[in-house]
Image (tube, rainbow, N blue to C red):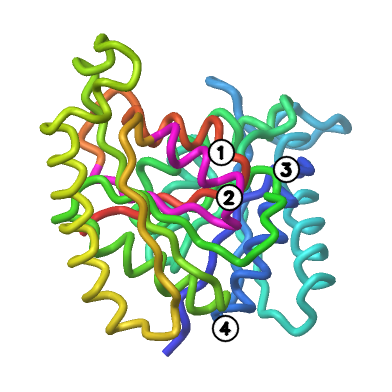
Amino acid sequence: MVAKPIVAATDGSQESLRAVEWAASEAALRGAPLRIVSAAALLPRMIGRQGGTAFDTVADVVREDRDRALAAAAHRAAELVPGLLVDTDPLTGPPAQAVTESGSGALMLVVGSRGVGAFTALVLGSVSRYVATHASCPVAVIRDETAAAHRQVGIGIGDLEHCADSLTFAFEEASLRQATLTAIHAWHAPQTDISRAGEAFTTPGALAVEADAARALAGLLDDWRQKYPDVPVSQDVVHGHPGRALVGLSARAELVVIGRHAHVGLPGPGSVTHAVLTHAHGPVVTVPSS
């Protein structure tokens, strides 16, 4: 049986090569093969060369750039992890959909946070958020590496009843990395923000909500502690916008994990996902709920 691969998308930019490096290290960590993909972002109505000619069409140049990006990425991955099984796959079709579909059946799909602003750069950057919110597998969006001094994986838990998939992913990553796991549950009540400074955080109602959430989170994590006894776990229940709390966590964790529900045609990602993907200080993984 062939092992499921880690899939990394490249457009030739330094940001996407950083994503390939991260994916190669992740593949080595998991003992998985690495598949590198790249899409030729042809403009509408652009067609390939019909018949022979001494000159390259724009479409030819775009495809050549894609193929060079694949070769460079494969070389980078092989240099970083000697012996890693690496293959490449040129994609066709609309870039966002093509890259998203390339993650079907993968352990994880890895993309950069932005591209370089040329034709093939359209593959990443502007579509990375689309991929992170639509792919059927976990998606890692690689931003600048954090300066975290300690090995730590963070996870944001919003819905305590529908977080099994993201918790599984986070605990597996922490175990593989021999890292600690920090779980954050942030609750936000905008109507309390109009209260005088400090009042909203100390009223009996607010304290009761926080205490109930802490107990529920502790009970949930106890079940996972039994499954992963090698992973030290801590928790934090905070009042504030979840996105802001997770962005803060990303400054000290080497990886932040957030769950996401199946996309149902809404115009864009949720505010929490949007905030974390836009402002995080390091790699973020979005995990779909089954």
Q: Identity of the amino acid at label 2?
A: Pro
Q: Identity of the amino acid at label 1?
A: Ala
Q: Is residue 22 left or right of residue 196?
A: right
Whether 86 is drawn above or below 188: the answer is below
- Distance CA(mark 4)–CA(mark 3): 24 Å
Query: Which residue carries the number 2 mark?
Result: 283
Q: Identity of the amino acid at label 4?
A: Gly
Quarter-of-image position of residue 42: top right
> Answer yes or no: do the residues labelled 4 and 3 have beta carbons within 8 Å?
no
Quarter-of-image position of residue 41: top right
- Distance CA(mark 3)–CA(mark 1): 15 Å
Specify start and end residues of the magenta stretch as a single range: 243-262
Query: Which residue carries the number 1 mark?
Result: 280
Foreground mark, 2 or 3, reads 2
The x, y position of residue 37, in whole percent, is 60, 55
Q: Nearer the viewer, residue 107 or 157?
A: 157
Residue drawn 68% across the image and 33% down it: 121
